């Protein structure tokens, strides 16, 4: 049996095995600015420069 870190400090590392069903998972992201991402043109220029 492999022991891992608990999901929360409120739970111990043993005796809390999940035995239910997951019916829905909802992921939400914030309104992050994507201006820090590399443009396709800059990515191509970097790829070509490495050759």
Image (cartoon, rainbow, N blue to C red):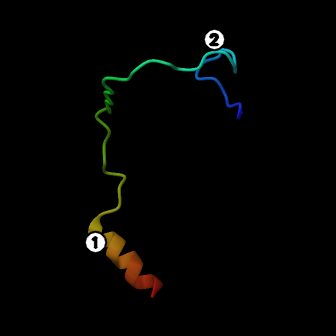
Coordinates of residue 17 in the picture (x, y in percent): 58, 20
Q: Residues within 10 Å of mark 1 (few under 14, many from 20)?
A: few
Q: Which residue is mark 1?
A: 41
**How far across and how far down the image is residue 31, in percent?**
28, 34
In the shown orientation, is residue 36 left or right of residue 16? left
Q: Earlier in the sequence, mark 1 or mark 2?
A: 2
Q: Residue furthest top?
A: 10
- Left or right: residue 31 compared with residue 10: left
47 vs 16, left or right, is left
Closer to us: 33 or 30: 30
Say few, some or many: other residues with alpha carbon within 10 Å of mark 2 (under 14 / 14 to 19 / 20 or more): few
Residue 16, horizontal then vertical, whole percent: 61, 16
Q: Are marks 1 and 2 in contact (CB under 8 Å)?
A: no
Image quadrant in which the C terminus is located: bottom left
Residue 7 x/y as whole percent? 58, 23
- The residue tagged 2 is 10
Up the image or down, 46 lies above or below 18; here it is below
**Residue at the spot 64% in from the left edge and 14% down from the top edge:** 11
Does 6 appear above or below 42?
above
**Quadrant including the N terminus:** top right
- Name the mark nearer the viewer: 1 or 2: 2
> What separation in Å lies between label 1 and label 2 (alpha carbons)?
49 Å
Quarter of the image where one finds residue 21: top left
Quarter of the view holding residue 28: top left
Residue drawn at point x = 40 percent, y = 78 percent: 47
Tell me which residue sits at (65%, 16%) in the image.
Answer: 9
Callout 1 secondary element: helix
């Amino acid at each position: 049996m492999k022991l891992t870190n608990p999901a929360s400090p409120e739970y111990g590392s043993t005796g809390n095995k999940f035995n239910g069903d997951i019916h829905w998972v909802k992921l939400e992201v914030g309104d992050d600015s994507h201006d820090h991402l590399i443009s396709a043109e800059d990515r191509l220029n970097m790829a070509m420069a490495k050759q």
